[in-house]
Each structure stands twice: as structure tokens, then as C-alpha cells.
Image (cartoon, grey):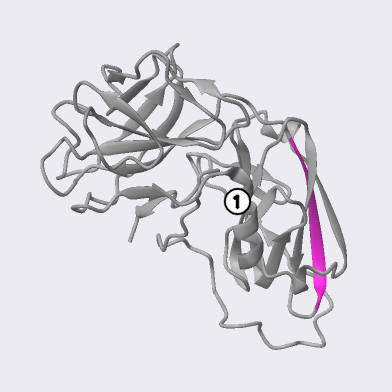
Amino acid sequence: MGDMKNLIHILIVVGAAMGCMDVNLLDDMVSRDADTGISDRSLDTGLDTGTVVLGPPELDTLDLQPPVLVTGCSENEVELTAGCGIDGNASFYLRFSTDEPAMVCGMADTAEVLSDEWATTHEVVIRKIDVVQQIAISVADVNGNERVVTLDVTAGVNPAIVIIEVLADCFGPEPDGEYVKIANVGNMTVDISGWMIDDNADRNGDVIPEGTLLPAGEMASIAMMGFSGANGLLIPLTSSIGTGGLKNSESESIQLFDVNGVLMDEYLNIVQLPKEGVPFVRRHALLPRFARNLWGYDE
């Protein structure tokens, strides 16, 4: 993580508004989600998006300064000139705050703004492609004073398999109905034969059968043999996920290791307890595993 400053080049430009104010970010996000081939579920997970104004704030003709970017990074984020970043295999995550409510838009097809309009805390996730790409992000106040942040984002790294959904407390018999759903957010088919799904990081979990391929943009459900609720590919196991199944009284961590024992992704949700019949879902398939408020109930 410490080398990220050498990987991400940031340029900040201050000037007149570049049309970000005319973009309907919600519509824009829907079309970009379709590009990933993976359904994104928007959840109310308690995301701290700062002070949200209902509609644009009032004009202030005396305000001629663009929003000031404020940085306060957490343990797993790297401090950048433009905010806090997390560099993942398939995406780059940027989080920053502004000193006033602002409209933010990613001025590229691969950038998605995840935070609310006219907030003071902002999130952007950038989908990586095969080559280094330069991404411009516009931050503008209601008066049209704009700050543009430009980042050079590194190319994507394959494989890029992530955990996107976990059901620990199912309706009906357990552990028959429990499952862990994974997705390939990279750009190539991955042979996940011999990979391991494990709970509590003890490395004695279940091994994915030989001949299991997960194409780019596809999802798969890992569950016991005979599971009937899969949406997409079913990866059947001869035993339960975890020892005797996943716990209902507490939220267990779940790890996905590749065939060489390298940790590829992790479900880590120590705050919320399982609810019967309600899965936990990743807030966005492309968010790296240390992004804030990554997991929430699918309600």
C-alpha cells in the first residue's frame, strides 16, 4: 500500500465549471453498471456521505472559490493529494471531503460517483482496464466554481474475483440453504479450480471442484450440493460452508483463497448480525475490500 503514491499521479485544476452540473449522476451510474456485466445493488448501509442538502444549496454570488478538498484517511487508505485511495485489482477507490456541499462527477466512462449529490463526503470508484488510464473528476459548488482532479490509474490485474453476497441464516433447513456468491469483476475468464472458500481464516475450508471456470462479468453461488436458489453458475460442495455451516449468532469472516493459498478477497463484517433469510451484499461489486461501509443487508 505504501507504494501507491508512486503509482497514482494527481493533477488538480481550478477553473470554470465543465458541465458536471448538467449530468444526472443516478442515470449515469445505471448505464455504467451495465458495462460491468454485474448487477449493482444500491443499499442504505449507513454510509457517511456528510451533510446532504435536499436539492442544490442557495446561490452565493460572493463565493468565487471552488470547493476545498479535505483529507482524513483511515488505516487501510493511502493519503493522496486529492483525498484517500485504495488500489484494488479491478478498481481504484477514491474518497474525499469538501468544505461545502458539492456536485461530483467522473468525467470518464470508467468512473462512477457513489455518493449523494450536494454532499460533503464523496466516493468515486474507477473500473480498471488493460492499460493505464487518466481519469478526470469534477468537483463543483452551486455557483459553478469547479476543481478538477486528474488521476493516472494503473491497469487492472487478473484474476479479480470478489465475494459479493453471503447468506448465513437461511429460511428452512441449515446449512442446505446457506451460500456465498462470488463475481468475476476482471476482464478474462478465470479457472477457479482448487480455490478454497473458508471461514474464520483457518485455511481448512472447502475446495472448489476441478473444471470450474468463471467468465468475466459472471457470478457464481457456492453452496451445498442440491442447492436450488442459485442465480447463474452453481458451484456445489459436498459439505457445508464452514464447520457445520455458518453461524447465526455472530458474523463470521469468510475468505476466498486461490489455488496457491493467496487471499483473493474477504467478507469481513463484525458489526451486523445475520438475519433470517436476509443476505449481506457488497455495496458495489467493484469496491475494494477495505472500502468503508462495504457490507449491508439486502433489504
Q: In terms of secondary structure, where does tag 1 sit? A: helix
Q: Residue at x 77, y 61 (%)?
A: 138
* Left/right of residue 222 with respect to residue 47 in the rendered view: left
Please indicate, yes or no, whether residue 259 appears anywhere in the rendered image. yes
Quadrant that contains the N terminus: top right
* Left/right of residue 21 with respect to residue 287 in the rendered view: right
In the image, residue 90 above or below residue 71: above
* Left/right of residue 272 with respect to residue 187 in the rendered view: left
Q: Residue at x 73, y 33 (%)?
A: 154
Q: Residue at x 69, y 88 (%)?
A: 58
Foreground residue among 23 and 264: 23
Q: Residue at x 20, y 36 (%)?
A: 246
- Rendering coords of residue 205 (x, y %): 27, 20
Mark 1 — residue?
A: 34
Range covered by the magenta-colored residues? 144-153
In the image, residue 77 above or below residue 63: above
